[in-house]
Every structure is written in C-alpha cells, then in structure tokens.
Amino acid sequence: MPVVPTNELCTSEEDLQGQIQAEGPVEAQLLGAEAEDASTPLASFPPVSSSSAIGDAEFLFMQALNGMTTQLLEFLILKYGTKEPIFQAEMLNTVLRDNQAHFQVIFRKATHCLQLSFGLDMKEVDHREHIYVMVPVLGLTLNEMQRDEQSIPKAGLLVAALSLIILAGDRISEEKVWGALSKMEVFPGIQHCIYGEPKELLTQVWVRAGYLKYRQVRYSHPARYEFLWGPRAYAETSKQKVKDYLRKINGRGPRFFPPRWA
C-alpha cells in the first residue's frame, strides 16, 4: 500500500472556493468547508500562562491532529482496497490508541478529506456496532474500476473537474481548470501524490472513459481547449447531484455560498 501524504492535501482543496467566476446561474461554490476544525476547543490541554504559549500549544495540537488524520486516512484507503468493512473499534484501537478522546474531530477531518481528495463517502451500515463502508460519491463508478490494494482512488479530481464545469456554466476553458486546480497543488505535467499525471487523466484517460469532453474552442487561434461533461458523467450522475454535493461539502449552511446565491 503506497503512503498517502494527505496532511496538507485536504486543506489545500478548500482553496478552490472562489477561484472560478461562474458565467451562468449556479447554486453552489466549490470546496470550502471544515474551517471550524482549526478552532477546535483544546479542552484537554493544561492551562498556560501567556498568549504566546497558548498559540504554541494550539499549533502543536493541530499538528498532532493532522498527523493522526493522515494515519487514519492511510488505514481507511487500505481498507477500501481490500473491500473490508471498517469497525470504529478497530480505528480506535489500531490507529488512534492513546488518542481516542479526539476521535470525533479526527474522524470528521478524515471523512471530509476522503470526499474531497479521493471521491469517497463514508457510510455507517451498522449504527449499533458502528460499522462503516466507503462508497463512491455521486454514483461514479470510477473508483470501483480501479479498486485494488495497491491503487489510490482518484475520483476526487474528476469530481472537482465536473464541479468546475457546472460552476462555469457547463463548459470551462482549460486555462481556468488548471488555475483552479493549482490551488490544490495539482499542475499539468507534474506528478501528484494521489492523481499521478493529472493532465493525462483529464485530457486522455477520462475522455476515453466518457466522463469528460476535451475539445478545441471554436475559431480559437492559436488553439485553445475547453472541458465539458461527457456522456458517461450524465449516465452515472446528474448536475443536480453535483450541486447538492457541493452544498453538503461547503459547510452545511448558506454562509458558504457566494453572496448572490445565499
């Protein structure tokens, strides 16, 4: 199982919010939730005597939370590859061990990152025993096609692309896509820790699979290109599902919407 360096990845995905100016009527803005985690009360920390010491303690605590979140994510991705159900008791005893008091915060951060980065939703299938399974977001079958113990789910990038297309009015220039994805540290021609070579995925692999259309902008000289939804995206999901998904990840309330849509 490859190591998943996720401690900075998920926060960088939130920076996509506001990068695309929508050209048509849209009802959601992309990827901007979970900021409240940065202000999690540090009730378990001992009293400190100065504001400087408080700041240092909070920084160290957040660093520790990020490290534990990364460990939990690596465990969850491994479980996804092996198709095994996930028991809360196993997460507590195998991954968190002496840090079980912070489970809810770490679990929330990890599941948020699963959605944004890997295109996976965590579903609780047994509420009494707290047993979970991971399923692809939006009904996309992309992750299931790749699923094995050595692969890392890549559908988070596809979901970002499909969302950007909707936010831009059903088509978006290639330049705007890379401008937005650069906020996630995703660049064309540069290997990414999760997505590999992203330009190949967006302009070749997922075009052949039917999820995206990649075509030259009409009458553009020199040639410029744009992205649209492909037929497989329409078959497996819908624009309304994407909009609902964006509402969900954007913070559970209208304060995360652009002012004109709040």
Image (cartoon, rainbow, N blue to C red):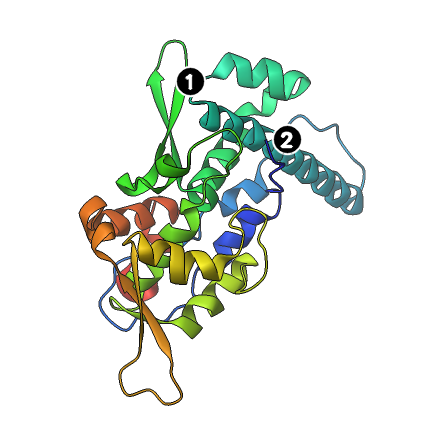
Q: Using the image, tell me which numbered label, if any, was put on residue 122.
A: none
Query: Neighbour class for label 2 at 10 Å: few (<14), some, many (≥20)?
Result: many
Judge by depth and name the residue closer to the eye, 240 or 18.
240
Against 205, residue 22 (above or below) is: below
Question: To which residue does mark 1 refer?
Answer: 85
Dot 2: what SS?
helix
Left or right for 237, reference 51: left
Q: At 25% across and 51% down in the image, what residue appears? A: 233
Residue 4 image point, x, y percent:
60, 39
Q: Quadrant of residue 121?
A: top left
Three-letter amino acid code at disc 1? Pro
Three-letter amino acid code at disc 2? Met
Residue 215 image point, x, y percent:
31, 72
Q: Quadrant of residue 185?
A: bottom right
Q: At 43% across and 60% down in the image, what residue appears? A: 17
Dot 1: what SS?
loop
From this viewpoint, is residue 78 visible? Answer: yes
Which part of the image, by quadrant, shows the N terminus?
Answer: top right
Q: At 28% across and 42% down in the image, what residue appears? A: 138
Judge by depth and name the residue closer to the eye, 197 or 57.
197
From this viewpoint, is residue 29 visible? Answer: no
Q: Using the image, tell me which numbered label, if any, was put on residue 68.
A: 2
Q: CA distance from mark 2 to mark 1?
A: 20 Å
Marks 2 and 1, the one that precedes in the sequence: 2
Q: Quadrant of residue 252?
A: top left
Judge by depth and name the residue closer to the eye, 247 or 222.
222
The mark total stands at: 2
Residue 166 image point, x, y percent:
28, 61
Left or right for 27, reference 158: left
